[in-house]
Amino acid sequence: MQRMRDYYLALGYNNPYKWAHFSDVPFQPLSKPVTKSRVGLVTTAAPFKPEAGDQGPGAPYNAAAKFYRVYAGDASKDDFLGISHVSYDRDYTTAEDIGSYFPLGALRKTQAQGIIGEVSPRYYGLPTNRSQDTTKHQDCPDLLAMLQDDEIDLAILVAN
């Protein structure tokens, strides 16, 4: 966390990064069992951008691969999503196993096993712009609208 504060100061911001926190967080209990619920997967992984350079497993940090709008994809397909746009320890971690940061296959298996009612028709991407205002006033309402349109009972957020 100190490294992030130092980074923001080095970028020329007048104050260090302030971590988001909320003392009053809304909670909605499930109205039906998980075994009968429609479950949506929300990820911060980025959709592939052909013009943005290397985004595959082991790719170096790639700011060109960032995305800035909430998106949705077809949950019945195995799309390539990458994490080259985020900082992670590339010395000790790879992005070779997409299931570690985009576990859509595992979610489908839970449906087949009867653990959840069904996987939503779409998966959802949430950007990591680091702007709390944009996240709170643009991205979250956009995501919520998609989840409501798809009648999602339960959303799982997999942040990278």
Image (cartoon, rainbow, N blue to C red):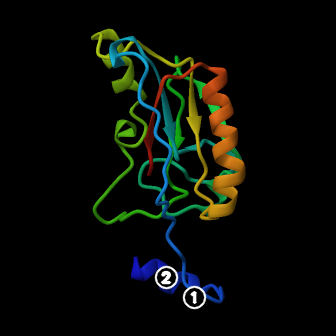
Of 55 and 86, the residue lying toward us: 86
Who's the residue at 49% across and 60% down the image? 22
Of 64 and 68, the residue lying toward us: 68
Q: Name which quarter of the figure residue 112 lies in.
A: top left
* SS under mark 1: helix
Relative to residue 142, is residue 62 drawn left or right? left
How many other residues sit within 10 Å of disc 1, few (<14), some (14-19) or many (≥20)? some
The x and y percentages for residue 98 are 40, 38
Q: Name which quarter of the figure residue 29 lies in.
A: top left
* SS under mark 2: helix
Residue of label 1: 9
The x and y percentages for residue 51 are 71, 49
Who's the residue at 49% across and 47% down the image? 56
Who's the residue at 61% across and 51% down the image? 127
In three-dimensional space, the C-alpha distance between marks 2 and 1, rounded to whole angstroms, equals 6 Å
Residue 56 in view (yes/no): yes
Residue of label 2: 5
Relative to residue 52, is residue 97 drawn left or right? left
The x and y percentages for residue 94 are 35, 53
Disc 2 residue type (three-letter): Arg
Who's the residue at 53% across and 40% down the image? 81
Disc 1 residue type (three-letter): Leu
